[in-house]
């Protein structure tokens, strides 16, 4: 047990937990018994709060644990996260402005609310809601894996069911303060999280390379390590096998980023279009941080860091690479601060994600199909309870899938959420796609995506299925036909599934339009997509 690290970690962890409870009174409205207040923070966050909220939401344990662990294990492939977070913001800059405007005019709380209004189809909205909830669970799971890796590094590493005890403790703490304070809790804690992370990373990238002989020496050791392995897909540089995977993974991840309900939640909580514009310009600053973090994967190789064995499974846990690097290379007191940064960096996005998923359940399943006359207070109560269930589902993802790299949890979620792109993102500009074309495309994309994920093994854990998101082209199947027999070139499953989705949606739409089948009722108007702060058309916040 690393007691110095644990005590410092515990003090900082308890401090931000207290902040989470106090956040219920921060910038409080008249009531928290309304989704506008509990789930969206009153829709009044300005530029700075939004910057920390969205940044805390998008740059997570994924950033601190998963990306460096992938670079440590696979090399250059892990750097897909850098171009993906660079190109994402120009792609979504204008669509997010339109989404904010139409949602504020009509009081939409979730992306599925918007789809319901745009197409007048509860069925299509239900599919979008279910997709968002299911895709969010593995993303929450990734955050909990990050927190678990820190606790394991500090010595809390039991066998059997005790091996996951830290996971359940984190679940309880996260669940309680999210239930109490809603979106205000992670918004407030995000300030502390970012300060700690920037402090730790700046120290790490300056101190560790100097201690280990410089970047040139570190890269030489990394190159030597990868050359000694039989895996053709690793290395300090990309090769013919993984270049296509790298490109499709970066583009697919960029397209998926703001389809996630938690990303949209941060946008909906913003005060106006100018807040979003400033943030889309400023948020790439986090990509600089991400690039520095990814380098720590190579630093861990240079330091001869080894992953800690998970006593629950008996296998080395790759996700502990960066925590163990800090533990062995930093003084104990600073390692404790670093562990707190990772732990808090996991709690903030996990809270936002569970809130976003809970909003989907409440507005697009509970109120739509179970209790159409639910009051705002009843909706808020449902959302609070649903946020607990979603976190528990995330725990099951970890226990059942046991991924080699925690980043695979997020990438599997990306395959799922990408199938909502036609209904959510493309519809911001056109209603050409028919409702049933979108439904058919969703079914095709989901079925094909899961079929491809099913055949990807995980040799590290001896799992035959759902071992990652990179598919060799030789395994790509079109109704039993293999167009690329023998090819070891890999591709991102989500990108392939999205193409199938769009093709099917377009074909079905063309057929239904030719037959003049009705395409639902659009409750939006063109002007709704351009409304801004102070516009008389904006729906009042938290109206009972």
Image: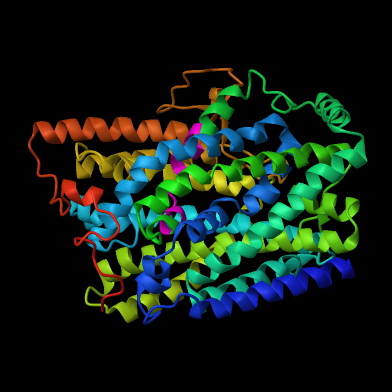
Check if residue 416 falls in the magenta segment: no
Colouring scheme applied when the structure was drawn: rainbow
Relative to 394, is 119 on the left or the right?
Answer: left
- In percent of width and height, residue 96 lies at 36, 47
Relative to 67, is 433 on the left or the right?
Answer: left
Residue stretch in magenta:
251-265
For residue 176, say whether it is visible.
no
The residue at 13%/45% (across/down) is 519
Quadrant where the N terminus is found in the figure: bottom right
Q: Is residue 465 above or below residue 38?
A: above
Q: Residue furthest left?
A: 516
Check if residue 254 falls in the magenta segment: yes
What's the magenta bit mostly, secondary-structure-wise? helix
- In percent of width and height, residue 529 lies at 24, 48
For residue 535, say whether it is visible.
yes
Quadrant where the C terminus is found in the figure: bottom left
Nearest to the observer: residue 274 or residue 475: 274
Where residue 471 sits, quadrant-wise, is top right
The residue at 80%/65% (across/down) is 159
Number of marks present in the image shown: 0
- In percent of width and height, residue 334 lies at 84, 60
Nearest to the observer: residue 238 or residue 398: 238
């Amino acid at each position: 047990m690393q007691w110095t690290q644990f005590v410092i970690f515990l003090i900082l962890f308890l401090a931000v937990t207290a902040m989470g409870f106090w956040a219920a009174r921060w910038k409080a409205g008249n009531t928290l018994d309304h989704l506008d207040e509990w789930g969206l923070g009153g829709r009044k966050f300005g530029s700075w709060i939004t910057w920390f909220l969205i940044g805390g939401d998008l740059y997570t344990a994924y950033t601190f644990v998963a990306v460096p662990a992938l670079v440590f294990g696979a090399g250059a492939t892990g750097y897909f996260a850098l171009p993906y977070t660079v190109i994402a913001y120009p792609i979504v800059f204008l669509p997010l402005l339109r989404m904010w405007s139409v949602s504020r005019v009509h009081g939409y709380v979730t992306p599925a609310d918007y789809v319901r209004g745009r197409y007048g189809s509860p069925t299509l909205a239900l599919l979008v809601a279910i997709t968002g909830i299911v895709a969010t669970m593995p993303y929450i799971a990734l955050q909990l894996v990050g927190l678990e890796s820190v606790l394991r590094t500090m010595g809390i590493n039991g066998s059997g069911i005790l091996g996951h005890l830290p996971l359940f403790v984190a679940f309880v703490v996260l669940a309680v303060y999210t239930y109490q304070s809603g979106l205000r809790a992670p918004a407030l804690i995000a300030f502390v999280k970012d300060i700690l992370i920037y402090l730790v990373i700046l120290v790490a990238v300056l101190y560790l390379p100097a201690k280990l002989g410089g970047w040139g020496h570190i890269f030489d050791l990394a190159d030597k390590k990868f050359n000694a392995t039989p895996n053709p897909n690793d290395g300090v540089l990309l090769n013919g096998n993984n270049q296509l995977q790298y490109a499709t993974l970066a583009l697919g991840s960029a397209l998926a980023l703001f389809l996630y309900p938690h990303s949209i939640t941060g946008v909906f909580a913003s005060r106006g279009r100018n807040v979003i514009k400033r943030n889309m310009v400023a948020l790439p600053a986090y990509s600089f941080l991400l690039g520095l973090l990814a380098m720590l994967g190579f630093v861990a190789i240079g330091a001869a860091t080894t992953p800690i064995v998970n006593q629950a499974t008996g296998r080395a846990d790759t996700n502990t690479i960066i925590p163990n690097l800090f533990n062995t290379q930093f003084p104990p007191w600073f390692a404790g601060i670093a562990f707190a940064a990772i732990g808090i960096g996991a709690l903030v996005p996990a809270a936002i994600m569970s809130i976003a998923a809970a909003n989907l359940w409440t507005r697009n399943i509970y109120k739509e199909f179970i209790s159409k006359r639910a009051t705002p207070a009843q909706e808020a109560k449902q959302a609070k309870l649903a946020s607990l269930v979603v976190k528990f589902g995330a725990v099951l993802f970890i226990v059942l899938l046991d991924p080699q790299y925690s980043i695979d949890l997020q990438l599997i979620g990306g395959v799922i959420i990408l199938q909502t792109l036609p209904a959510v993102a493309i519809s911001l500009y056109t209603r050409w796609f028919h409702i049933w074309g979108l439904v058919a495309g969703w079914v095709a994309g989901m079925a094909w995506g899961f079929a491809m994920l099913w055949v990807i093994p995980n040799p590290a854990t001896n799992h035959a299925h759902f071992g990652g998101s990179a598919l060799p082209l030789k395994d790509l199947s079109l109704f039993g036909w293999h167009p690329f027999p023998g090819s070891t070139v890999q591709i991102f499953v989500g990108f392939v599934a999205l193409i199938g989705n769009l093709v099917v949606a377009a074909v079905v739409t063309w057929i239904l339009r030719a037959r003049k089948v009705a395409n639902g009722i659009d409750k939006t108007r063109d002007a709704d997509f351009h409304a801004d702060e102070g516009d008389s058309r904006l729906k009042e916040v938290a109206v009972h």
